Image (cartoon, rainbow, N blue to C red):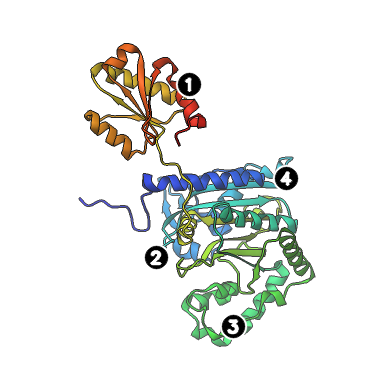
Amino acid sequence: MDVKAPRGTQDILPSESEKWQYVEKVLTNLCRTFNYKEIRTPIFEHTELFQRGVGDTTDIVQKEMYTFKDKGDRSITLRPEGTASVVRAYVQNKLYGLPTQPSKLFYFGPMFRYERPQQGRMRQFVQFGVEALGSADPAIDAEVMALAMNSYQQLGLQSLKLVINSLGDDASREAHRNALMEHFEPYRTALCNDCQIRLNQNPLRVLDCKDDRNHPAMKNAPSILDYLNDYSSTYFEEVKGYLDQMGIPYVIDKNLVRGLDYYNHTAFEIMSDAEGFGAITTLSGGGRYNGLVADLGGPETPGIGFALSVERLLMALEAEGITLPIDQKLDCYLVALGEEAQKEAVRLTYQLRKAGIQVDKDYMDRKFKAQFKAADRLHAKYVIVLGEEELQDKIVNVKHMKSGIQKEVPVNQLVDYLNKELQGGNEHD
C-alpha cells in the first residue's frame, strides 16, 4: 500500500513549521499595531455562500471549488477564499451593530482550490487576510494597503511593488462594461473559449485572462480610468493622496481587475521583483467590495480587504535570501545515569517544564556518550547531568555546552539558576 499526500497538498515538517509559526507571530503582532482583531471561521460553508459572494462567473466557482453533498443532502464547499466567510460571519453575528466601527478583522487558515499544482500554487494553501467593514473612507483603503505592504517589509522583504487601480462604482463599471463589449466583439472568435463566455457575462474578466493576455486587442482595450464618474475619480485621487502622505510608492495598472466579482473602487496587488522568484510574481491582492455585505443579507455596508498566501511569502523570503531569526536551540537536555536517577529525571524534567524552561531527556535507553550526542543534535544550550552520586548529594551538574564550563547546582535551586542563565545572566555566550 503506497499512501501519499494528495496531489497539490504538502506536509509541513518540524524543520519548516517553525518558520510558519514565526511568520504567523509577526503578522499577528502587526495586526495588533493596526488594531485588527482575529476572527476564525469554518473550513467549509454552504456552497451558495461562494456562488453569491465570490460570483458565478469566476474561475473559482466555475472550475476550482471542492464541493460535495453531506449526509443531509446539503451542498457543502471547502472554502476557496476567506472574504466571503468573514462577511457571512459579520452578517450572521450582527457585528455591524457593535459600537466600535469599523470592524477590523484578520484571519489565518487553509483554503482549497482545484487547480493545476505548481510552485507556490497548491490545492490546499494557507491564507492570511484582513477585512475592514463599515467605513467608506478612502483613508482606510490606504491603511489596508499599508498593512499589506508592512506584512512583507516586517519580515525583511525589499523587492516589492504595489500596483493599484480603480474599478469605479456601479455606474462607472456599467459604462466601462459596455465599452469593453464593443471593443472585444470583433475579436470574439479569436479569444479563448472562457473569454467568449465572459464577454457576455462579465467582460471585465477578459482583461484578467492568462491565455489571452498577449492578444493585440488587450493593448488598446478601454481603460476603466477613462470611464470613472466624478465620485469614483475623486475617491481614487484621495486614496492615492493618502498613500503619498505615508510615503508608500505605487504603480497604476489600468488592466488590474482582480479575479473576483465583488470588487469595486480600489483594487491592488503586491508583486515581487526578486530575481528568480518565478513567473507568477503576484504575492497578494485585495480591494474594496461595498456591495458584498448586502448581497449576503446584511445592511448596506462598505468593506475592503486583502489576502496573501503564506506559501508564496516564504518563497519570496527564500528568493531574497532572507533567513528568519528562529532560535532552534533547546534550553537544556537532562542526562541521567542509573535506574533511580532515571526516575528522578522524569520528575525534574516536568518541574523545569512547569517553570517554562524548554527541556528534554533520553527516552531511548542510550549510554552516557550517546545522550550527550543527542544533546548536541538538539543544539542544547545546557546539559544537566544526574547520576547516583549527584542523587545522593541532591545536586546536578550543569554544563554550558558552548564554553564547556560546568557547575554543581543544588536540585532545589536548579530552576532559579537556569532562569537566570537563560535570561542573560551568564557570560559564556
Query: How far is the residue under mark 1 from the one under mark 2?
Result: 55 Å
Question: Label 1, on which residue?
Answer: 416
- Of helix, strand and loop, which one carries label 3? helix
Query: How far is the residue under mark 1 from the one under mark 3?
Result: 70 Å
Q: Is residue 322 above or below residue 223?
A: above
Please name the residue shown 54% across and 56% down the image.
Answer: 308
Please name the residue shown 41% across and 41% down the image.
Answer: 328
Report the front residue among 202 and 83.
83
At label 2, which amino acid type do we have?
Answer: Arg
**N-terminal of the two: label 4 or label 3?**
4
At label 3, which amino acid type do we have?
Answer: Lys
Question: Label 3, on which residue?
Answer: 219
**N-terminal of the two: label 1 or label 3?**
3
Q: Position of residue 415 (x, y in %)?
A: 45, 21
User: Could you say which disc has been placed on residue 138 in the image?
Assistant: none
1 or 3: mark nearer the eye: 1
Please name the residue shown 47% across and 28% down the image.
Answer: 421
